[in-house]
Image (cartoon, rainbow, N blue to C red):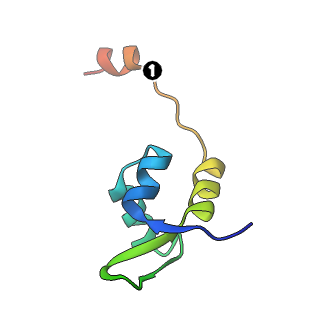
């Protein structure tokens, strides 16, 4: 699979997850990052690796009704 490097924010939008979640995964070393050659403040992530990571993660299903009754 080819690497497809993009900003964490762009990857987060495509995967419908929080940019903070991706940043935490990168900080913990669970996903690869690299420097953006055009902006030293920004780190890039491999979108294909990230997509595979989220597809293989266990799904957590919650029922809003149950959450409301326990509050």
Judge left or right: residue 56 versus residue 17: right
Counting from the top left corner in percent of width and height, residue 64 is at: 38, 19
Q: Quadrant of residue 22?
A: bottom left
Q: Which residue is mark 1?
A: 63
Determine the residue positioned at 74% across, 66% down: 1
Give the image location of residue 66, x and y in percent.
Answer: 39, 17
User: Measured along the vertical axis of the image, is residue 16 above or below residue 10?
Assistant: above
- Relative side of 4 to 11, left or right: right
The residue lying toward the viewer, choosing from 14 and 50, is 14
Is 37 rendered above or below residue 64?
A: below
Extreme front residue here?
38
Task: Please give the name of the residue rendered at 45% of the width and 73% of the height, measured from the top-left corner.
Answer: 44
Along the line of sight, which residue is nearer the eye, 5 or 28?
A: 5
Q: Classify mark 1: residues with Cα within 10 Å, few (<14), some (14-19) or many (20+).
A: few
Placement of the C terminus among the 4 image quadrants: top left
Q: Please determine whether, in this image, residue 34 is positioned above or below residue 11.
A: below
State the SS at label 1. loop
What number of labels is visible? 1
Image point 36% across, 50% down: which residue?
Answer: 18
Tell me which residue sits at (59%, 55%) in the image: 51
Q: Residue furthest left?
A: 71
Q: Quadrant of residue 65?
A: top left
Measured from the top left, where is residue 39 in percent x and y?
A: 32, 81
Vertical order, 69 against 1 (above or below): above
């Amino acid at each position: 699979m080819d690497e497809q490097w993009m900003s964490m924010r762009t990857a987060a939008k495509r995967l419908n997850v929080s940019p903070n979640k991706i940043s935490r995964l990168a900080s913990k070393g669970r996903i690869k990052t690299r420097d953006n050659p055009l902006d030293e403040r920004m780190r890039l992530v491999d979108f294909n690796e990230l997509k595979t990571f989220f597809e293989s993660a266990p799904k957590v299903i919650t029922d809003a009704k149950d959450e409301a009754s326990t509050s």
